[in-house]
Amino acid sequence: MQRNKELGSVDSFMARAVRYLREWPARHGRTVHNQVLRGASYSLGSGAVSVLILWIEARR
């Protein structure tokens, strides 16, 4: 019996996650894939700054 409860909670979690992602553009004004690209660009920029700082420190 416990297994069925766990399985049901996983199914309801997935249903809520899918619904949340479908409703994302209405709440935030942009699509999920655009938001992922935005986050990736911030991460890339942060990594570039870190590499630049390490390079400057290594040259000293």
Image (tube, rainbow, N blue to C red):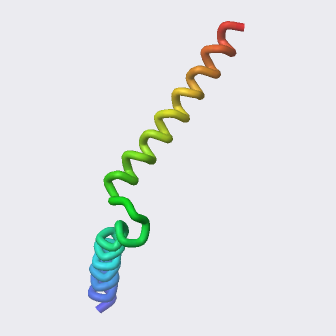
Is residue 44 toward the left or the right of residue 52 in the image?
left
Q: How many marks?
A: 0
Tell me where residue 13 appears, x and y as whole percent. Answer: 34, 78
**Residue at the outermost front position:** 29
**Residue at the outermost top position:** 59
**Residue at the outermost bottom position:** 1
Tell me where residue 38 appears, x and y as whole percent. Answer: 42, 46
Which of the 4 quarters of the picture holds residue 1? bottom left
Is residue 40 toward the left or the right of residue 54 in the image?
left
Tell me where residue 20 appears, x and y as whole percent. Answer: 36, 73
Position of 52 relative to 35 (above/below):
above
Q: Residue at x 29, y 71 (%)?
A: 22
Which of the 4 quarters of the picture holds residue 7? bottom left
Viewer-proximal residue, 9 or 42?
42
Q: Residue at x 33, y 59 (%)?
A: 31
Tell me where residue 46 appears, x and y as whole percent. Answer: 55, 35
Position of 40 relative to 45 (above/below):
below
Quadrant of the image containing the C terminus: top right
Is residue 56 toward the left or the right of residue 5 in the image?
right
Position of 19 relative to 33 (above/below):
below
